Image: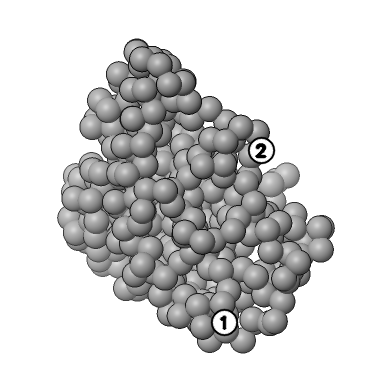
Amino acid sequence: MKQIYLDFNASTPIAPEVGEAMRPFLTGHFGNPSSGHWAGVPAKKAVEKARCQVAALLGCQADEIVFTSGGTEANNHAIKGVFCAQRQRGRHIITTQVEHPAVIEPCRFLERWGAEVTYVPVDSTGRVDPDEVGKAITDQTILVSVMHANNEVGTIQPIAEISRITRERGILFHTDAAQSVGKVPTRVEDLGVDLLSVAGHKMYAPKGVGALYIRRGTTVEPFMHGAGHESRRRAGTENVPHDVGLGAACEHAQAWLGMPTVRNLRDLFWKTLRESFGDRVSLNGHPTERLPNTLNVSFVGREGSKVLSGLKGVAASTGSACHSGTVEMSPVLQAMGLEPHVAMGAIRFSLGRGSTLEEIEYVVEELRRIL
């Protein structure tokens, strides 16, 4: 059976260059980076080199990077850390209705601890209006958290416009950039953010590693308490091989920013689907302000999970989930206002560096057979 992977927004393989960089720290260089002797020094240097590589991709200083166990921890650290550090000044947080659970759930957790959270709506393309964020700000607002790019539909949010509002009001701004880092430019000065989350396995690094950018001068409570690792911002002995892998992935991502070849293939995929199915297929997400690799489409009147199950050997994701025998609409598509008969037919195809025209042609032909 042919196997085609079109779920790169879910996870990516480890790039060959990343594996090569990690190998010496899997088979040797086992020392603790906090040790000052011959075994620990190479590990310490490797972690600091990786920190510089991540910083170079984000356009920040190395001491503004904190290594984490992944994007979820980075989001939790940013949101809970700001709340704990600044709740005497205010307890209001603003986010959107289409955030990843790694943002939504920490906000809901903090609501149990006295936080007030505003979930700003989005339009039919999944985009938030910066003016709506501005209107939601009160004198108690301490943090705004808006994802850079949506994991389901790929819509890119107007982060720079929102940051101008937060800076004018003196409010910290966090963005979950797990889906965008390594695909599109994410330089923190251009975005204007104070905190930014990175997930390694979304950008050809291993699972179990990520990073949080914390702008100099920003006070955030440590997420992990213990010894003084990560400049006392995240206790725990460093995961040297994975940190090295993330650094290498960030360095090699520089050449892929914008992903023009992947974008062209994605656009051809959509064009072919429209030619094949006409109005029976619709695009979900912003038509232009969208990740270059992401194509979320609805097969109108169909159930996405059943269509996908017919695509034998094709790895992709649906826009609905089955729980206890019932099919539920994706909260993201629901927030975008999609009608149930459209949203239930959603499938997300997310392409990667190695995706080919032959794979896309095969998937389209199989969809013609199924539908």
Disc 1 marks which residue? Answer: 169
User: What is the distance, in whole Å, between disc 2 and disc 1 at their CAs?
Assistant: 31 Å
Residue 367 image offset from top left, x and y in percent: 35, 51
Q: Could one spot residue 35 in this view of the protein?
A: yes
Q: Quadrant of residue 135?
A: bottom right
Tell me the number on the disc at residue 225. 2
Q: Could one spot residue 284 in this view of the protein?
A: no
Give the residue at x 45% y 80%.
164
**Which structural element holds mark 2?**
loop
Q: Quadrant of residue 262?
A: bottom left
Residue 249 image offset from top left, x and y in percent: 30, 40
Q: Please state if 235 lies on the left or on the right of 88 as rendered.
A: left
Q: Quadrant of residue 108?
A: bottom right
Q: Please state if 48 lies on the left or on the right of 220 as rendered.
A: left
Tell whether label 1 touches label 2 (CB within 8 Å): no
**Image vertical order of residue 106 relative to residue 145, above or below:** above
Tell me the number on the disc at residue 325. none
Near-viewer residue (245 or 326): 245
> Which amino acid is tagged 1?
Arg
Instruction: Report the quarter where the C terminus lies.
Output: bottom left
Residue 82 image offset from top left, x and y in percent: 63, 59
**Crowd around label 1: few <14 · some 14–19 · many ≥20 (10 Å):** some
Instruction: Report the quarter where the N terminus lies.
Output: top left
Give the residue at x 28% y 32%.
18
**Mark toward the start of the polypeptide (2 vs 1):** 1
Give the residue at x 69% y 51%.
326
> Which amino acid is tagged 2?
His
Residue 122 image offset from top left, x and y in percent: 55, 76
